[in-house]
Image (cartoon, rainbow, N blue to C red):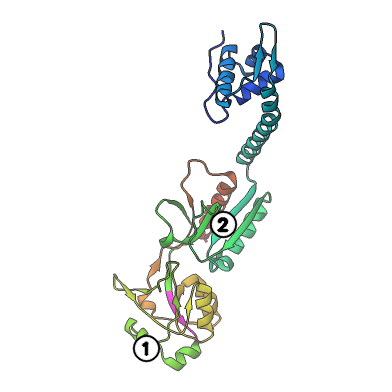
Amino acid sequence: MKQNFTVRQGALDGVEAFLSVAHHRSFRRAAAEHGVTPSAISQAVRALEERVGAVLFIRTTRSVGLTEAGERFLTRAKPAFEELVAASAVARELGQRPAAGLLRLTVPPAVVPILLEPLIASFCQAFPEIEVEVAANEEMVDIAAEGFDAGIRLGQFIAADMVAVRMTPSFPLVVVGSPEYLHRRGRPERIDDLRQHACICMRRSNGSIAPWSFVSGKKPIEAVVSGPLIAHDFPTMLGAAVEDMGLAQVPEPIAAGPVRAGKLVRVLEAFAPMAPGVFLYYPSRHQVMPKLRAFIDHVKSRADAADKT
């Protein structure tokens, strides 16, 4: 004996029942198709007619036919409903496929050459069905509102409501200058010495100029600095320092290459604070799309491999 199920309420409540009755020209056959009672189908159609404000079927004891309003409703509703079903199937397939689709990431420009390029190369080889889009932007963006799957940032800039996955160990923020600049202006030995130096500044996304951060013993210190250039990203600061414009404070991994090449020299190393590192972050969701899950797992495996070396 069939239970008297009711069709779920919602904006499309009754449309599927209507289409089934219109196709079979029978409430009983429509009910059998959906595994419910004819009464449930009839109630769903009647509720739809009340919302539409028109009778859609002509009912007799022997047959079911469409009224003129029903014919017009069928003409418009059937293709729209089929498109909705198709859209649901596409979304379901994408959500259930092992890993495919477009993965959109927002990242600061500085991490692209030193961190992201090798990571993306190995990821794309491992998951050829995933297309990766990288938007290099120093500004913090609302990844959900802007349509990104995830972002990459220094840990201290990630909102508390995000899920964060570590990509690098902690590292110091270092002050660097070119050999030519230091020969010309002298090497700072104390934090206060920065008052006599040209310092390349960073403008934050909120418009303020970021102070430089230091530690003396265990005490954090912020120094307000000034100089000939205000940049909006670390690569610009680093490039200006290489060109003898002044001192710059940047994450150590960004400066490592020019320091090894002898283009820059680290100063004030005893006062360098530690940054928490670089993290992949994404909105806290109960269900993560397979393409993002694949990237998260790839990031973790690379981080684990780096820890073992």
Q: Which residue is mark 2?
A: 105
Residue under pointer 1: 196
Question: Which residues are drawn in magenta?
Answer: 174-178
244 in relation to 35, above or below: below
Residue extending farthest to the bottom is 184
Q: Position of residue 57 (x, y in %)?
A: 65, 17
Determine whether, in the image, residue 62 is placed left or right of residue 302.
Answer: right
Q: Residue 73: horizontal and vertical position, in percent?
A: 67, 27
Q: Is residue 144 magenta?
A: no
Q: Does 74 sit left or right of 300 as displayed?
A: right
**Based on the displayed image, in which of its 4 quarters is residue 189 positioned?**
bottom left
The residue that appears at 40% across and 88% down in the rendered structure is: 187
Residue occupying image coordinates x 54% and y 62%: 107
> Which is more toward the observer, 181 or 6?
6
Query: Of callouts 2 and 1, which one flags the residue occurring earlier in the amino acid sequence?
Result: 2
Q: Position of residue 135 (x, y in %)?
A: 58, 61
